Amino acid sequence: MLEIKNLVVQIEDKRILNGLNLTVNKGEVAAIMGPNGSGKSTLSYVIAGKEDYEVLDGEILLNGENLLEMEPDQRAAAGVFLAFQYPLEIPGVASMTFLKATLNAQRKARGEEELTTPDFIKRVNAAAQQLEIPKDMLKRALNVGFSGGEKKRMEILQMALLQPSFCILDETDSGLDIDALRIVSEGVNALRSPDRAFLVITHYQRLLNHIVPDTVHVMHSGRIVRSGGKELALELEANGYADYRDSEAA
Amino acid sequence: MPAVQETIDQVRSIDVDQYKYGFETEVEMEKAPKGLSEDVIRFISAKKGEPEWMLQWRLDAYKRWLTMTEPAWARVSYDKIDYNDIYYYAAPKKNPAPKSLDEVDPEILKTYEKLGIPLREQEILAGVEPQSRVAVDAVFDSVSVATTFKEELKKAGVIFMPISEAVREYPDLVRQYLGTVVPVTDNFFATLNSAVFTDGSFVYIPPGVRCPMELSTYFRINEKNTGQFERTLIIADKGSYVSYLEGCTAPRRDENQLHAAVVELIALDDAEIKYSTVQNWYPGDSQGRGGIYNFVTKRGDCRGRNSVITWTQVETGSAITWKYPSCILRGDNSRGEFYSIAVSNGMQQVDSGTKMIHLGKNTTSRIISKGIAAGRSENTYRGLVSAHRKATGARNFTNCDSLLIGNECGAHTVPYIESKNASAVFEHEATTSKISEDQMFYCQQRGLSEEEAVALIVNGFVKDVLQQLPMEFAVEAQKLISISLEGSVG
Ligand SMILES: Nc1ncnc2c1ncn2[C@@H]1O[C@H](COP(=O)(O)OP(=O)(O)OP(=O)(O)O)[C@@H](O)[C@H]1O
Ligand SMILES: [Mg+2]
C-alpha cells in the first residue's frame, strides 16, 4: 500500500531523513519507534505533504500513486490521514463545523455526494460516543482550550469520520490517561480492516499492548535501521536504543 | 456557522480581481453641471423641491466648507481630489421621483434584481416568513428610486422614506433633528455633505413602537465621475426599537469616485437602534486602479436615559475607507456598542474605528473590532474612548484583533483613551496574529484546499462580530468576506 524508497529530506540545510526505506502493506499495522529527534515526525509530515521540507531524493508511493506530486489536500482525499503529535487550534471554528467542512471537501474531491446534515450528525454522534467525547465538546472551537488528551481524542474522532485508507498516528498515546489510552486504542482497533493500513509512531510498549502491531521498525538518524515483529518492541523497551547508537558510531 | 460550504463554493466560482457587482446600468441621467458652486447647490435644492430653510442650511455649510481643509491625520494616502471635477447630482431622466414601482425605469429594477435586492413587495411576501421581511429604500446615484412597505410601516406609525421627501412632508421633525448629532461644521467631509447631500433615508419610530420589520437602504453608485453624498437620519422616540441595515455597491471603473455620507442616529429614553452596514463599494483592482473613496461620518446620540445604540459593520469594499461610527453616551445608563469586521486586500487602505464618548452616569460601551489584512493592503483601527467629568461609573471594554494574511500587508491599532472621571473603568485588549503555516497545513491535511482553509480560519476569526448581524445578512456577509480574500494565498 505505502512504499517509500531511498527518501532523503532536508530542512534549512539540515539532513533529517537519510535514504529511508519502508513498505507497509494493506491491512498491516506498522509501528515505528526511535529516539527523540530521529526523524519520525518529519517522516509523517513528508508523507502528508507539509511544505518546508525539501525532498532531495527518493519516492513515496501510495497504491502506486506518487504522493510527492500531490498537494496536501489531494493526498488527504487519496486517503492519507495524519493524527498530529501536536494538534492545531482553530479559534472560532466549532469542531462540528470543522468536521463537516473537511468531510464534505474530501467527498467532493472524490466525486461523491455531500452528506446531508442529519446523516452527518448521525455519523459524528456515533463516533463521538465510541470515543466517549461529550457532545458539548463538539460545539467548542476546535482544540481551543482542549486538554492534551482531549485533543488526541479529537484527532481519532476525525480519523473515524474521514475513514482514510492510510493512517499515521504520531505519538497519539502521549498525554492520554489510562482509560483514554484504552478508549482511543479501541477506536483505532475498530478501524482496522484489510483495506486500511496504519503507521503508529510511539515511544512506549504500552500502546502496542492495546494496538498490537504486525511489524515494528526502529528509526535512527533518519533511517529504518531494523525491522521485526511485535517482539522487537519488547526488546527495545528492555534495552533502549544503546545498540543502535553504537552501530552508528561504528 | 452554517454557511461555510456555501462560502467555499462561492470562493471557488470567482476569479481573482472579479468584483461581482461591477456591472454598469445604461440609463439616461440628468446631471447638475460639473463642479461645486452656489448655483449647483441651488440646482440640487430646486430639484428636490426644498423649502427655503433647507437651501439656506446648505449654503451656510458650503460657505463654511470653503474655509476648511481636508484632514490628513488618517493612515491613508491618495492623490488630491479635485472637487470641481465631480458631478454632485445625477438622477435618472425618466421619472426621477416615481410614485410606485410601475413607474420605475425597468433598467433600474433589473439592476436591483441583479444585485439581489427585492423591490417588489408581492415577490418578497411570497413564501417568506413575515418576521424576516425587510423594507428597502433604494438609492440610485443621487435619488431614491423606490421604498417598499411604506404603507404597512405607516400603519405602525413608522416613517420610512427618502430624506428628500421627509424634508417636504415632515419639515418640523427633520428640522428638529438634522445636524444635531453631526453638526454642519463637524469635519471637512461632513460639511461638504451638508452642502450637497442628495438622498438617503429618514426613519422615525414613534414612542413605544417596535418597528415591525428590518429597515434597509441600498446605495448604488452608477454614474461616472459622480459623487454620492447621502444623508441618513434615524430617530427612535422613547421606548422604541429599530434595526436598520445599509448595503452598497458600485461599478468597476478605473477612476476613483467619492462617497461622503453622513448618518445621524438619535435614541431617546429607553430606545434602541441597531445599525448594521455591509459595505461593498468597488475596491479597485489588484494594482490599486479605481475604487471608491469612502469618507463617511456616522454618529449616534444616546440622548435619552437607558438608550442603546449598536453599530455593526462589515467593511470589505472601497479603495479607501475613512469611517468612525461613534456613540455619544449622553443619557444616564445608556449603552454604545461597536462591532466591526474590516477586510482589506489588494491595495486597499482602511482607517476605521469608533469613538465612545461617555457623558452620562453609568454609561457603558463595548468595542469589538476584527481587522483582516491581505495582499498589499493597510488596515488601521483607530478608536477613542473618553469619559467626561460627570461620567461617574463609565465602563468600556475594547477588544481589537488583527489577522494578517501574507507578508506584504500591514495592521495597525491606534487607541486613544481619555478619562476625566476617576471612577471610569476602561479595559483594552489587542492581538495581532497571522494565519500560521501550521494551521493551514492542518486544515489541508484534513482535505481543505488553501482557499477553503483561509475561508474557514477567517470565518472563525470574525465569528463574534458576525453573530451581531441579523441572520439573513450574516450569511451574506460571510460570503462577502471570503470573496474579498480571494487570491490572498498561494
Ligand atoms: N524546522 C526545522 N528546522 C530545523 N530543524 C528541524 C526542523 N524541524 C525538525 N527539525 C529537526 O529534525 C530532527 C527530527 O525531528 P522530528 O520531529 O522528526 O523527530 P522525532 O523523531 O519525531 O522526535 P520526537 O520523538 O521527539 O517526537 C530534530 O533534530 C529536529 O530538531
Ligand atoms: Mg515527533
Image (cartoon, rainbow, N blue to C red):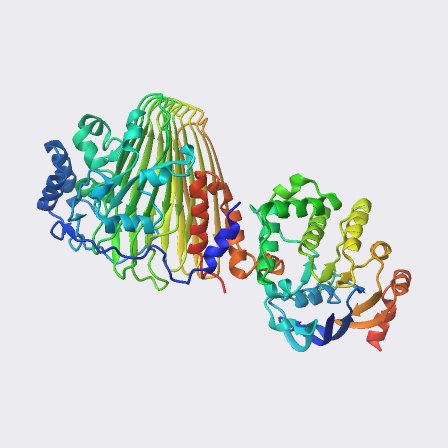
Nearer the observer, A192 or B282: A192
In the image, B84 versus B118, the foreground residue is B118
Relative image position of residue B271 (x, y in whole percent): 37, 25
| Corner quadrant of residue A220 | bottom right
| Ligand 1 - quadrant of the structure image | bottom right
Image height of A190 relative to B102, above or below:
below
A62 relative position to B340: left or right: right
Q: What residue is drawn where x is 33% and y is 59%?
A: B284
Q: Relative to residue B229, is residue B449 drawn left or right?
A: right
Residue B120: where, in percent of width, then height? Answer: 31, 41
The x, y position of residue A117, in whole percent, is 59, 46
Residue A33 in view in this figure: no
In which quarter of the view is residue B64 placed?
Answer: top left
- How many numbered circles are shown? 0
Q: Quadrant of residue B136?
A: top left
* Residue lying furthest left: B39
Instruction: Give the answer, above or below, for where B74 lies relative to A221.
Output: above
The residue at the point 77 percent across, 48 percent down is A176
B339 left or right of B187 in image: right
Closer-to-camera residue (A192/B298)? A192
Image spot of residue B210 (x, y percent)? 37, 26
Q: Is residue B52 visible?
A: yes
Camera-nearest residue between B48 and B319: B48
Vertical position of residue B290 compared to residue B159: above or below: below
